[in-house]
Amino acid sequence: MAKIKIKQVRSAINRTARQKATIKALGLSKLNQTVEHEATPQILGMVKKVQHLVEVVE
């Protein structure tokens, strides 16, 4: 599978608990932190839910 890099570009402060949990599940905890994941449907769905907080590089 293809790898994608996910970078947190906006804070999770004042977001719903569900969005905070999604950010944490992606492995992000700080601004400008980057993580690499396989581009599975589950990961892509999580990214879509918090697309306003993250930036994706394929």
Image (tube, rainbow, N blue to C red):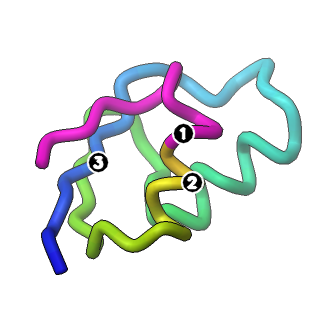
Relative to residue 52, is residue 46 depicted above or below? below
Relative placement, left or right, of 39 versus 47 is left
Q: Which residue is mark 3?
A: 6
- Pick the front one: 41 or 4: 41
37 within the magenta span? no
Frontmost of labels 1 and 3 is 1
* CA separation in Å, label 1 and label 3: 11 Å
Q: Which residue is mark 1?
A: 48
Residue that extends furthest to the right in the rendered view of this protein = 17
* CA separation in Å, label 3 and label 2: 13 Å
Frontmost of labels 3 and 2 is 2
Instruction: Please provide percent x and percent y for residue 1.
Output: 18, 80
54 within the magenta span? yes
Relative placement, left or right, of 11 versus 6 is right
Marks 2 and 1 in Cβ contact (< 8 Å): yes
Q: Residues within 10 Å of mark 1 (few under 14, many from 20)?
A: few
Q: Which range of residues does the magenta coloring cover?
A: 48-58
Q: Residue at left 58%, top 50%?
A: 23
